[in-house]
Image (tube, grey):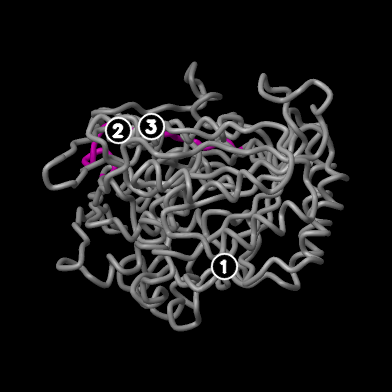
Amino acid sequence: MLLDTPHDGLAVGQRAISDLEAHLLGELIRPAHDDYDTARQVYNRAFDRHPALIVRAADAADVIRAVSFAREYALPLAVRSGGHSMAGHGSVDGGLVIDLGSMRGLSIDAARRVAWAQPGLTWGEYATQAQAYGLATSAGDTSSVGLGGLTLGGGIGWMVRKDGLTIDNLLSVELVTADGRLLRASADEHADLFWALRGGGGNFGVATAFQYRMRPAGTIFGGAVVYPATREVLRGWADYAQQAPDELTSIAFVMPAPPAPFIPADQVGKLVAIIGLCAVGDLAAAERTAAPLRQLGTPVADLCGPMPYPAMFALTEEATHPQPHAIRSGYLQSLDDDVLEAVVEHGNQMPFPFGLIQLRALGGAMARVPSDATAFAHRDKSFLAAVIGGAAEPAQYEPQRQWTERLWGVLRPQAQGAYMNFLEDEGAERVREAYSPASYARLVATKRRYDPANLFRQNQNIRPED
C-alpha cells in the first residue's frame, strides 16, 4: 500500500509563523493554501506526506531563516531541490519543507569553463544553457532531476566514464549549516566539509549554490539501439562496455517496449534491451567507438547519430513523470550469465507497462579518482544495477513492488554496496553500505562537527551518535 501518514498539528504560535512569513523574500505555504497539494508532492508518489509549512526559498537568506525556524521550534525538516529522492525525503509529515525550486540562477564563464548554479535548476535546464557554449558538466541521465540532490549523492550519468562523477567536477559549495551559518566549502575552505559533501548527501546542511568545472561537449554521438532482450545481447553489451574507451558511456534498460513511434506495433509490450549510449569527442571516432553496440544482434530500432548533448535526456523522458516507484539497487563487479538470465527471466514477468531493470557500465575516469578522495567510495565497481517498479496509479504499485523485491532477492547475493541516490528507505545498514568503513567513520565525525543535533535527518541519514 502507499505510504500515507497524516501530519500532526503544528505546535508553533501563529505569531511566530507570521513573523517567519513577513521576513521571507520567497513564499510560505500552509495547508490552506491553494497550491498546498501541489507543493507538498514529491517525485516518488509512493510517499504522500503532509508538511505543516513549506518555505519556497528565494535566496540563501530565506534558507537561513527557515533552518533557524525549524531548529528553534524543533520541527522535522525536509529539503527539496528537484524532489527526485526515491525515499521521498523531499517532504515530511507535520514539519517544515525548504523548497529550493525557485532558486534557479546560472552563470557560466565559458573562458574559464566554470559555472555557478543554484540548486533549484534541473539538469536538463543546466545542460541546455551550457550547450550554448559547447560545454557540459557530467551529471545524471534524467532532465527533471534537481542539481542539489544528484550532486550531493555523487552523480552518475551519461559522461561518467569520460569526465567522472558530478562531484569530481565540483569546485565549491555554498551551504547553510544547522546553526544558521552560510559557509563556502572547497578544497581550500572547510575542506573536511567539502570532502563530506561529495557523496554524503544532505546530512550537513542546505546547499544554496554550486560551482562546477565544465568540459567540452558540443555535438556528441549518442542515442539508443533497441534489441529484443536476450542474455546474448546483454552479454555482448556488458563485455564491450567494460573495455570500451572512456569516451563511451552506456546504459542498458531492460523493459517492455513502449508504444513509441520508433517501435513497430507488433513489438510494443515485448521485452527489449534499450542500449543508451553517449560517445564524446571527435565525431568520426565517437561513431566508431559506438559501432559495436549497434551490432549486438538485429535491432528493433536504431536511434543513434550526432546530436547535441542535451538531446540524450530524451531517452529518459518517461522518467520525468512523477509516479509511485519501488527501487532496489547495488553495485556488481561483473555481470555473470546467471545474473543476465535472471534479468531476462524476471523482466518477462514484469507487470506491464511500467518498470525496468537498469544496468550501468562504470569505470573510466570515475575509477581513477582515489576512493578516499571524496565520501563517495565505490569507485572500483564495474556495474550498477537498479530494479525499478513504477505504477501509473496506486492500484498498480503493490504488484510492482513485489516484482522489484523478487528480482532484487536474486541479485542481492552478488551485489556490493549502495548508491546513495538510488536508495529507498531501506534502513541504517544500507546507508552504511554506501561507504567504506573508514569513509563512514569520517562522515560521522563531520556530522558531529556541523550537525550534532541531527537537524538534517530527513535523508539517507548519517547519525552523529554512530
Q: Earlier in the sequence, mark 1 or mark 3?
A: 3
Q: Is residue 31 above or below residue 329?
A: above
Residue to which mark 1 is pinned? 382
Q: In this view, does 436 lie above or below 257?
A: below
Residue to which mark 3 is pinned? 308
Q: In this view, does 441 lie above or below 267?
A: below
Residue 103 in sight: yes
Q: Where does the image place residue 137, in percent across and percent down from the top left?
A: 32, 46
Please give the name of the residue rendered at 23% of the width and 28% of the height, measured from the top-left corner.
25
Question: Mark 2 against mark 3, which lies toward the viewer?
Answer: 3
Residue 78 in sight: no
Q: Where does the image place residue 262, in percent across and percent down from the top left?
A: 66, 23
Q: Residues within 10 Å of mark 1 (few under 14, many from 20)?
A: many
Q: Are marks 1 and 3 in contact (CB under 8 Å)?
A: no
Q: What stretch is highlighted in magenta?
A: 49-64
Residue to which mark 2 is pinned? 131
Q: Does the magenta stretch include residue 348?
A: no
The quarter in which the N terminus is drawn is: top right
Q: Do the residues labelled 2 and 3 touch (CB within 8 Å)?
A: yes
Residue projecting furthest to the left? 111
**In whole angstroms, how far apart are the C-alphas of marks 1 and 3?**
27 Å
Q: Which of marks 1 and 2 is nearer the N terminus?
A: 2
Question: Mark 1 against mark 3, which lies toward the viewer?
Answer: 3
The amino acid marked with disc number 2 is: Gln
Q: What element carries label 2?
A: helix
The amino acid marked with disc number 3 is: Pro
Please give the name of the residue rendered at 77% of the width and 64% of the height, measured from the top-left corner.
339
Left or right: where 317 falls relative to 78: right
Residue 240, disc: none
Q: Is mark 3 on a helix, strand or loop?
A: strand
